[in-house]
Image (spheres, grey):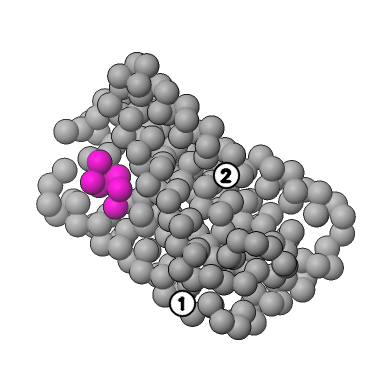
Amino acid sequence: MTGGSRAVPAVLGALLVLASVALGIAVRGTPPGPDVALRDRARGLGPGFVQAAELVSFVLSPGLAVIAVVSLGLRAVLAREVLVLKAALLLGVSWCTILARFGYDRVRPVVFDLPSYPSGHVTAVTSVAFTGVVLCAHLARRHLRTAVVLAVAAVALCAAGRVVLTVHWLTDTVGAALATTGVGLLAALALRLLPAGVGSRGEQS
């Protein structure tokens, strides 16, 4: 990857991280109007919506990220595959953005021990989705567009579920997606995982 081609994802990644930081600082105090309005609307939804949100939150959860990173790590060790090892590192680094929540220390819409911003579920799912897209770009490039659509859908569903359950503000989910994607882009550059490579398989040096 040339210096010019590296600049675009590097700048985009940095801007996404900065946007997440700015949003986190802005909402750290009194929740903005849209957050409060969505929370109040979510409280009026019927049990069907709540049950659906609980199912989504169970499937698309930090447990998914644990399974993914452990699986990638074991595959990398047993098969000695550099690409898989880099993917495991990418997922882990992206997921670590959740630690920022202790710096913002935002109060949740409901009583809960952990800070609200950014959403842990959305951070985990976004890290898995981003890593999956990167791997698809390397191993099955013809399906890359489908992978991106599925990744965005998974993150959006997870975010909606957390808001419906009123365990997070909407801005918690937005900030999580911004930070995780931004850090993911920067980590992928550092690990030489962008661009995907020449052809449908293989890793570009």
Q: Badges 1 and 2: C-beta atoms under 8 Å apart?
A: no
Residue that lies at the very extreme toward the right in this rendered image: 47
Q: Residues within 10 Å of mark 1 (few under 14, many from 20)?
A: some
- The structure residue drawn at horizontal position 48% and vertical position 43%, both measured from the top left corner, is 129
Q: Toward which corner of the image does residue 16 lie, by quadrant? A: bottom left
The image quadrant where one finds the N terminus is top left
**Residue for point 52% across, 47% down:** 124
- SS class of the residue under badge 1? helix
Return the x and y of residue 169 as percentages of the image width and height: 63, 68
Figure disc tally: 2
Q: Magenta stretch: residue 131 in it? A: no
Residue type marked 1? Ile
Q: Is residue 200 visible?
A: no
- Quarter of the image with the C terminus in it: top left
Report whether residue 95 is seen. yes
Percent x, y for residue 201?
A: 30, 24
Residue name at image x 49 percent, y 80 percent? 26
Give the residues drawn in magenta, as a range.
186-191
Q: Label 1 vs label 2: CA separation?
A: 24 Å
Residue 138, compared with residue 156, is above or below; it is above
* Secondary element type, mark 2: helix
Taking depth in this image into account, of 69 and 197 the one nearest to the observer is: 69
- Residue at the image position 54 percent from the left and 46 percent from the top: 125
| Disc 1 target residue | 25
What residue does disc 2 label? 62
Give the percent coordinates (x, y) of residue 17.
37, 63
**SS assignment for the magenta stretch, majority:** helix
Please state which amino acid type lies under the numbered disc 2: Pro
Report x, y in % for residue 58.
69, 43
